Image (tube, rainbow, N blue to C red):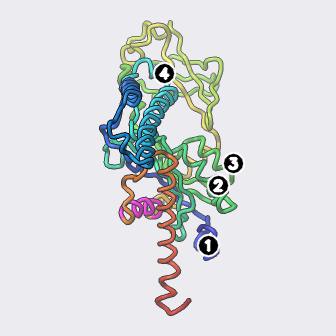
Amino acid sequence: MLGVLSAEGLVALKTVMHDGTKIAAHAGRGSFRHEEQIQKHLEAVRNRVAAMGDPRRDMETPREAAARDRARRERIERLEHAVAEVKQIRVAKRPGYARTNQQQTGVSSTDPEARIMRHADGHCALSYNVQISTDADNGIAVSVSVGQAAPDYEYLAPAVEQIKTRLGRAPEQIVVDAGYTSRQNILAAHDQNIELVGPWIENDGRVRQRFARAGVSDGFLPDKFNYDAASDAYICPRGKHLVACKGRIMRPGRTVVRYQASRKDCTPCPNRGQCCSGNTRCGRSIVVTHEDPTVSAFRARQKSPRTRALLRDRGRVAELANAWLKEKLGLRRFHVRGLKKVASETLWAVLTYNIQQWIRLRWRPRLETGGV
């Protein structure tokens, strides 16, 4: 289909708008089970199947008996799959999560591969994350994928690879929302000579809340510490020096350095209660991030009129495909279960969307003018 649309001149790949949407899984809220519940249910089903003796069994046709056996086998397989998915989720959690939050780990017993995700209207439900890349010139979808992870940033690189595989080249420019503008994605796009356009969230409020919980007042936040280039040290509001610790942490797109004050300077400080009251073993420290030049250049483009115009246009293009799938095709809830099957259903829906755009852009004008 993309080959036909390209031949029609409907795919330019000059600018691609990328966006994602959450679509509910074919699983009810009541199907969500924790691991202990799933294990008990699985054991009960196995025991029931083993001990089952149906007096009507002799009256069944071979076809009915095969269907009944298949239904029991699939039920056991779904529960076994659910147990495996719970273990996979626990491994993926941060260290200590499974030990302290084991009761919060679970999956659906009917669709174990679905995950609880927050939708745009704020409600949470068992869902899948659908990602679509749309060519900006004519609104043609050029990549589609379905995943289990709720965060959007990890879907951008696979989308670019899919476009290259299907169309033979990468787009010149990709426009995304804030959920995709990670440092790793900025560097990856730059390495492939793709211009990534998207908003950068300077501060979402969580950092300030974290300092507030630690008892740090606004006057002693990291941005109130002045840097002295001559000594490579930061000076706190009370005039004390914080020197760089040994070892720098290298992360994608940035270098992290910790600056530490002397305990002898902080212990007698009259503002200790506002600065580092919870730190009794050493002096106050701050963590400073040195951005990669590519990331700095990306951030510098945020205020340009061109970037703002592209971001305003992104919603019109990228969100249209998602809205079309939900409003025109009714794909608000999947009709099948499992990641492979919902990916197939999504692909059929996006193929339908592209065919409808093809009819709108090429066939309808030709028919209206009497052309062939």
Circle 2 Cα neighbour tier, 10 Å, few/some/many (<14 / 14–19 / ≥20): some
The mark that comes first in sequence, 1 or 2, is 1
**Residue 211: in sight, yes or no?**
no
Q: What whole-number distance in Å separates the C-alpha atoms at marks 1 and 4?
A: 64 Å
Q: Residue tagged by mark 4? A: 236
Which three-letter amino acid code belongs to the residue tagged 2?
A: Ile
Relative to 250, 140 lies left or right: left
What residue is disc 1 on? 4
- C-alpha separation, residue under disc 1 versus residue under disc 3: 30 Å
| Foreground disc of the pair 4, 3 | 3
Kind of residue at disc 1? Val
Q: Is residue 43 above or below residue 203?
A: above
Name of the residue lying farthest toward the bottom:
370
Q: CA distance from mark 1 to mark 2?
A: 25 Å
Name the residue nearer the viewer: 244 or 40: 40
Tell me whether circle 4 and circle 3 mark residues in contact (CB < 8 Å).
no
Image position of 275 (left or right of 232)? left
State the image quarter where residue 197 is shown: bottom right
N-term-proximal mark, 1 vs 3: 1
Q: How many tags in the picture?
A: 4
Which segment is the magenta one?
317-327
Pointer 3 residue? 191
Residue 142 in the image: state x and y as whole percent. 57, 62
Residue visible at 36% across and 14% down in the picture: 273
Discs 1/2, front: 1
Picture coordinates of residue 358, whole percent (x, y): 52, 74
Measure the C-alpha gap from mark 2 to mark 4.
41 Å
